[in-house]
Image (spheres, rainbow, N blue to C red):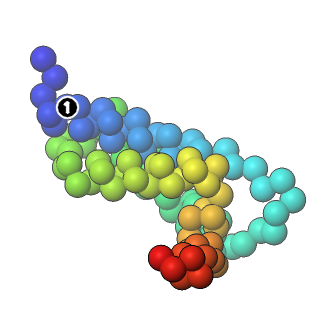
Amino acid sequence: MVTLNELLLIVNAITCAVIAVTLGTYQRNGAKHKRLAALFAWVLIVACGSVTILIVTGRYSTANVAETAINMALCVAVLSAKGNVMKIVNRSDVMSISKRGARNGK
């Protein structure tokens, strides 16, 4: 029988691996290179990759529900942005959505 902690560790490892691979395999396809975005992506790749490695090697033994939820939310954001960090952190997208909502009376 799998305990809740073991289930959280498995979900966390898979989620972090998906984040790291998605960010690591992102292709710019002619988009402008942005150093800050590249640094941010690199930090996320290293952090998420290390969590996966630590869980698989048994050095990371306790998972938290909140941590797993945050990682899952980040994974959804990275997948929806197709690995493009600028789509996640670009404030103009958020501003355009809020302006559209304000115009529609929302």
- Give the answer, above or below, for where 77 lies relative to 49: below
Residue at figure coordinates x 12%, y 17% from the top left: 1
> Quarter-wise, where is residue 25 in the image?
top right
- Give the answer, above or below, for where 73 lies relative to 7: below
Label 1 element class? helix
Direction from residue 87 to residue 78 in the image, left or right: left
Residue at figure coordinates x 57%, y 76% from the top left: 104
Residue 14 seen in the current view: yes
- Give the answer, above or below, for where 59 lies relative to 23: above
> Quarter-wise, where is residue 67 in the image?
bottom left
Residue 53 seen in the current view: no
Direction from residue 96 to residue 10 in the image, left or right: left
Q: Nearer the viewer, residue 27 or 35?
A: 27
Position of residue 47 measured from the top left corner of the image (x, y, whole percent): 43, 55
Direction from residue 67 to residue 97 in the image, left or right: right
Q: Which residue has dot 1 on it?
A: 6
Q: Amino acid at mark 1?
A: Glu
Position of residue 99 measured from the top left corner of the image (x, y, whole percent): 59, 81
